[in-house]
Image (cartoon, rainbow, N blue to C red):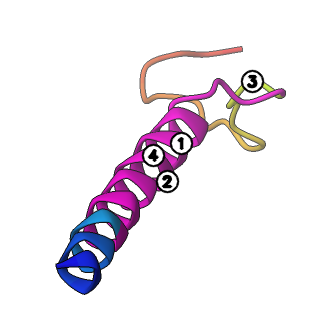
Amino acid sequence: MSRLLAAVLTVVAAAALAVGAALGIVALLDATPAQPNTPLITYEQAGQGS
């Protein structure tokens, strides 16, 4: 019975670790970038004279 308990605990620990890693990755992807996303090149629209 102790082998079955060890197997169940291992599966539960692995599942908890996988969920924690997934949540950590999602939190990293939701982080705002340190630099604003501004275009390097801008094009004038037709009809706008300068």
Tag 2 near tag 1, CB within 8 Å: yes
Residue under pointer 1:
24
Local crowd at mark 4 within 10 Å, few (<14), some, or many (≥20)? few
- Asked where in the image residue 36 lies, by quadrant, the reply is top right
Mark 4 to mark 2 CA distance (whole Å): 4 Å
- Asked if residue 29 is positioned above or below residue 12 in the image, the reply reads above
Q: Earlier in the sequence, mark 3 or mark 4?
A: 4
Q: Position of residue 7 (x, y in %)?
A: 27, 79
- Asked if residue 11 is positioned above or below residue 25 in the image, the reply reads below
> Which residue is painted at 38% across and 67% down in the image?
14
Residue under pointer 3:
36
Local crowd at mark 1 within 10 Å, few (<14), some, or many (≥20)? few
Mark 1 to mark 3 CA distance (whole Å): 23 Å
Tag 1 near tag 4, CB within 8 Å: yes
Mark 1 to mark 4 CA distance (whole Å): 6 Å
* Mark 2 secondary-structure assignment: helix
